[in-house]
Image (cartoon, rainbow, N blue to C red):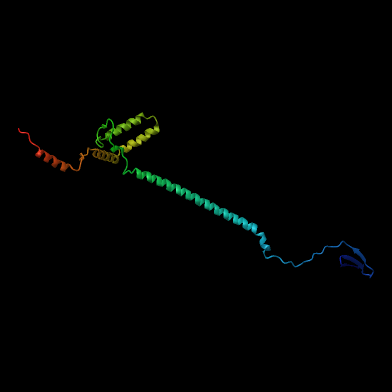
């Protein structure tokens, strides 16, 4: 029977007959020994700074994007307010009441002489029949099919009763607005001047006749 024993890195083998064992020397093995070592408290946390720094960088980048977006929106709002204030300033410098309608403007030329005061040159009003004839002539002169269809739609509109009523009302208002207005007084002391003239006439020496 063979018996193998280990002692201090040596191997000894012996048979069961009590004979002397032959020592076989092997290469010395490396023994690992455990020792108690004091570890710092933050040893496990030293692997987290890289991950935390990346998260903080993303947060800072997001905050920077929000700040830039707010600044850009503020600049756009200021530009809109500035443009609006400029338009309001121009409108206040040139105030206009109502809607500009060239129908009521005095005609300068054949329709109304230039020497007449404003509103005395009445515009030439177009009658409904003349309007229809003009549209038909324009339709015949056009060579484009699409343009002819557009004029046909206008003709259909002109022939409707509601349009004709509105057209007649427009002509009546334009004619009324362009009537010659009564003369305006040259002074607000007309009565005093009349009394003064009468007094001068009474006190003036009369020529005998």
Specify whether 154 is left or right of 69.
left
The quarter holding residue 173 reads top left
For residue 41, what is the image quadrant? Answer: bottom right
Q: Residue furthest bottom?
A: 18
The percent coordinates of residue 117 (x first, y second) are 25, 35
Q: Is residue 57 left or right of residue 12?
A: left
Which residue is painted at 60% across and 56% down in the image? 56
Q: Quadrant of residue 125?
A: top left
Taking the image as shown, residue 33 lies to the left or right of residue 94, namely: right
Q: Quadrant of the C terminus?
A: top left
Residue nearer the viewer, 128 or 171: 171
Q: Position of residue 164 (x, y in %)?
A: 28, 39
Q: Is residue 103 left or right of residue 11?
A: left
Q: Is residue 48 above or below residue 132?
A: below
The answer to which of 187 and 97 lies nearer the viewer is: 187
Residue located 48% across and 48% down the image: 75
Residue 199: x %, y % from top left: 11, 41
Tell which residue pokes out farthest to the left in this image: 209
Which residue is more in the foreground, 37 or 199?
Answer: 199
């Amino acid at each position: 029977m063979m018996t193998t024993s280990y002692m201090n890195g040596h191997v000894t083998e012996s048979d069961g007959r009590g004979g002397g064992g032959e020592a076989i020397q092997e290469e010395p093995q490396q023994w690992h020994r455990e020792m108690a070592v004091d570890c710092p408290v933050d040893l496990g946390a030293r692997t987290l700074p890289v991950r935390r720094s990346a998260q903080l960088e993303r947060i800072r980048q997001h905050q920077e994007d929000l700040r830039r977006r707010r600044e850009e929106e503020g600049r756009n709002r200021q530009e809109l307010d500035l443009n609006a204030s400029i338009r309001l300033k121009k409108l206040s410098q040139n105030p206009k009441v109502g809607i500009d309608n060239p129908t009521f403007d005095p005609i300068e030329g054949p329709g109304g002489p230039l020497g007449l005061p404003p509103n005395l040159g009445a515009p030439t009003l177009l009658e409904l029949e003349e309007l229809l004839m003009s549209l038909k002539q324009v339709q015949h002169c056009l060579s484009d099919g699409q343009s002819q269809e557009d004029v046909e739609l206008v003709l259909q509109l002109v022939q409707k009763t509601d349009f004709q009523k509105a057209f007649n009302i427009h002509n009546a208002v334009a004619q009324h607005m362009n009537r010659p207005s009564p003369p305006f007084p040259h002074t607000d002391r007309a009565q005093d001047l009349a009394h003064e003239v009468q007094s001068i006439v009474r006190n003036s020496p009369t020529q005998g006749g």
